[in-house]
């Protein structure tokens, strides 16, 4: 009798496992290769074989939302979508949007110490590009920094372009609402001066004065048309913690494009985990992850 019950329990467990397996969508190697090649071609992100579980985890919810039977079905849906909306959604899922206010402290210290030298021949006109701006902390940090450190800033012509491939994060950046946690690492005087607390949302809202300095746009650094920009138009380009996801050829191409868009002796700021060791032709190192066009 005991043996019969053990057999029944095994059958129940087996059937339960089958039910769970059927509801779980597993990304197989062939499907992963399709997404890997698509993501590399359209986003420039080079996914190693070990990223298969990451891709599965990030796409699984979307596959379920669309009520699709497999990852291959989602891939077909993605490729067939001519509106670009699904690609934008995929970009939001795949991109890593880790950022913070005044990230890379040493870079801000360098900028402050060399502010006069960097801007002495600018005739009160500045053009800055925050490439891959994510949820906006970087461009707002730039705006706050300039407002704090440039005397009579109202007499200056300052424009900050902030771009990202993800419409979702750009929407958040444009809204300019940040949690207490997001503002926690910032100097309290900056929070008081440049943010107002919204009791209804329990969020801090960026001052409109900063927003007026920034233009947010959707832009793909890999497939975007760089001819839209004028050569030598930017004084500084920030592209931090982005190129680590690209392979060397993509990095090389991007750095060359940045160089063409920088003015004479313009600056390129990259992430502390990045370096232009093999591809810094046309640049000289000025400080930690800061390069000047030569």
Image (cartoon, helix red, strand yellow):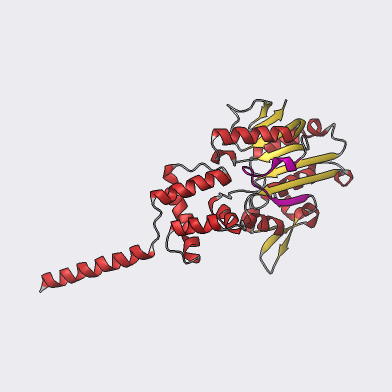
Instruction: Reply yes or no: does residue 224 show up in magenta.
Output: yes
Q: Is residue 203 above or below residue 213?
A: below
Q: Horizontal and vertical percent for residue 97?
A: 58, 50
* Numbered range of the magenta stretch: 214-229
Q: Horizontal and vertical percent for residue 65?
A: 50, 66
Front residue (pair 165, 126): 165
Q: Quadrant of the C terminus?
A: top right
Front residue (pair 241, 204): 241
Q: Horizontal and vertical percent for residue 111?
A: 73, 36
The total number of labels drawn is 0
Q: Horizontal and vertical percent for residue 74?
A: 48, 58
Q: Residue furthest bottom?
A: 1
Quadrant housing residue 227: top right
Quadrant housing residue 238: top right
Position of 249 compared to 234: left or right?
left
Q: Is residue 223 above or below residue 267?
A: below
Instruction: Reply yes or no: does residue 237 show up in magenta.
Output: no
Q: Is residue 181 above or below residue 117?
A: below
Front residue (pair 291, 108): 291
Position of 48 compared to 104: left or right?
left
Q: Residue furthest left?
A: 1
Q: Quadrant of the N terminus?
A: bottom left
Position of 272 compared to 55: left or right?
right
Q: Which residue shows up at 68% across the image and 35% down it?
A: 257
Q: Which residue shows up at 81% across the image and 34% down it?
A: 119
Quadrant housing residue 178: bottom right
Q: Which residue shows up at 61% across the image and 48% down it?
A: 99
């Amino acid at each position: 009798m005991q043996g019969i019950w053990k057999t029944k329990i095994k059958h129940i467990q087996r059937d339960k496992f089958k039910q769970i397996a059927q509801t779980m969508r597993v990304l197989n190697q062939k499907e992963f290769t399709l997404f890997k090649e698509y993501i590399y071609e359209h986003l420039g992100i080079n996914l190693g074989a070990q990223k298969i579980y990451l891709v599965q985890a990030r796409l699984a919810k979307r596959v379920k939302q669309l009520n699709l039977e497999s990852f291959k079905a989602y891939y077909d849906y993605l490729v067939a979508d001519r509106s670009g909306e699904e690609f934008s959604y995929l970009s939001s899922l795949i991109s890593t949007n880790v950022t913070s206010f005044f990230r890379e402290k040493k870079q801000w210290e360098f900028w402050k110490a060399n502010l006069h030298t960097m801007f002495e021949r600018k005739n009160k006109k500045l053009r800055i590009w925050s490439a891959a701006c994510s949820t906006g902390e970087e461009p707002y940090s730039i705006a706050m920094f300039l407002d704090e450190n440039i005397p009579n800033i109202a007499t200056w012509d300052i424009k900050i372009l902030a771009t990202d491939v993800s419409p979702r994060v750009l929407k958040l950046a444009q809204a300019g609402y940040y949690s207490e946690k997001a503002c926690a690492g910032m100097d309290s005087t900056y929070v008081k001066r440049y943010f107002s607390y919204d009791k209804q949302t329990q969020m801090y809202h960026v001052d409109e004065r900063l927003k007026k300095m920034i233009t947010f746009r959707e832009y793909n650094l890999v497939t975007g048309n760089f001819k839209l920009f004028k050569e030598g138009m930017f004084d500084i380009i920030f592209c931090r913690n982005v190129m680590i996801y690209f392979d060397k050829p993509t990095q090389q191409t991007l750095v060359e494009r940045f160089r063409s868009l920088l003015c004479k002796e313009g600056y390129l700021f990259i992430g502390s985990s990045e370096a232009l060791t093999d591809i810094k032709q046309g640049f000289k190192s000025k400080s930690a992850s800061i390069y000047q066009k030569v």
